[in-house]
């Protein structure tokens, strides 16, 4: 069984997907982490994130694998590095590169072949797993999403203002929604849920009920 959870940053999809996977006792796949890992590799190189050919070469040459939920890039745990503001800033540029997407879509489908999965991203229901049994698209107002992301960043020691977080989030949404290749959008058969006024626990319960139907 494949369950896809797509949606913009701050919609709660990562936390919800992880909890849903635990409730269903299946694997959890964070595909945003994979795009972030490529962005990380680009940052660690001399290559500019806008150099499509050089970025494609990086994406094709790196070794990317999950050891449990730990993402390893060329054998090194990059779970922390991929969450830095620098990586976040270029991840949507790298994710618009068709060669990067082709490579990562292949890897994601390989994970899907290994058994049941809750997978989250932007294109999991629309492109990567069109035949998934359950598809959800989580959304929330940009204000609600910025407030959530800001709270997380402050808890992690960041001093970014709410306004800056909101501007960055809106820029990233814009790039993710308008890229030519696999833009962020709900699959035609996805159930869309606005999580603005919902707690994480409420969203998880709702999804558990939908999957059980
Ligand atoms: O969900 P996230 O913030 O970790 O995602 C990082 C970037 O990768 C974001 O700009 C969207 C992009 N992404 C994507 O294009 N497709 C996916 N399946 C997952 C993430």
Image: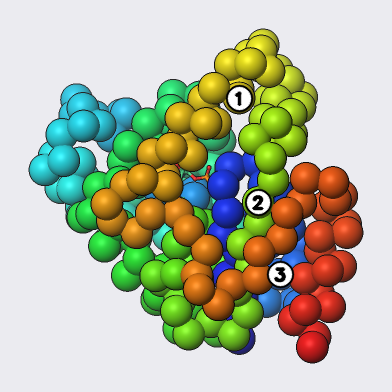
Q: What element carries label 1?
A: helix
Q: How far apart are marks 2 and 3 (CA)?
A: 19 Å
Q: Is residue 78 above or below residue 2?
A: above
Q: In the image, what residue occupies the spot 66% across and 64% down?
A: 192
Q: What element carries label 2?
A: strand
Contact, mark 1 vs mark 3 (Cβ under 8 Å): no
Q: How far apart are marks 1 and 3 (CA)?
A: 29 Å
Front one among 155 and 6: 6
Query: Is the residue marked by circle 3 packed among few (<14), some (14-19), or many (20+) residues within 10 Å?
Result: many
Evaluate whether residue 188 shows in this view.
yes
- According to the picture, the residue beneath numbered tag 2 turns out to be 139
Q: Which mark is residue 209?
A: none
Q: Is residue 24 above or below residue 30?
A: below
Query: Is the residue marked by circle 1 packed among few (<14), some (14-19), or many (20+) residues within 10 Å?
Result: some
Evaluate whether residue 34 shows in this view.
no
Q: Residue 166 carries which label?
A: 1
């Amino acid at each position: 069984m494949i369950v896809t959870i797509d949606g913009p940053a701050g919609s709660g999809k990562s936390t919800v997907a992880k909890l849903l996977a635990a409730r269903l006792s299946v694997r959890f796949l964070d595909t945003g982490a994979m795009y972030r890992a490529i962005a990380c590799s680009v940052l660690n190189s001399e290559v500019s994130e806008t150099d499509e050919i050089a970025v494609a070469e990086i994406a094709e040459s790196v070794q990317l694998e999950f050891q449990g939920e730990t993402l390893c890039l060329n054998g090194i745990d990059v779970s922390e590095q991929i969450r830095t503001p620098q990586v976040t800033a270029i991840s949507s540029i790298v994710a618009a590169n068709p060669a990067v997407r082709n490579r990562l879509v292949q890897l994601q489908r390989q994970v899907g072949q290994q058994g049941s999965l809750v997978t989250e991203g932007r294109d999991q229901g629309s492109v990567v797993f069109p035949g998934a049994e359950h598809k959800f698209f989580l959304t929330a107002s940009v204000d609600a999403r910025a407030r959530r992301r800001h709270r997380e960043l402050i808890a992690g020691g960041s001093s970014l203002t709410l306004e800056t977080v909101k501007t960055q989030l809106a820029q990233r949404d814009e790039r993710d929604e308008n890229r030519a290749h696999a833009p962020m959008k709900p699959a035609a058969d996805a159930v869309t849920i606005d999580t603005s006024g919902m707690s994480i626990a409420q969203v998880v319960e709702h999804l558990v009920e939908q999957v059980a139907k």
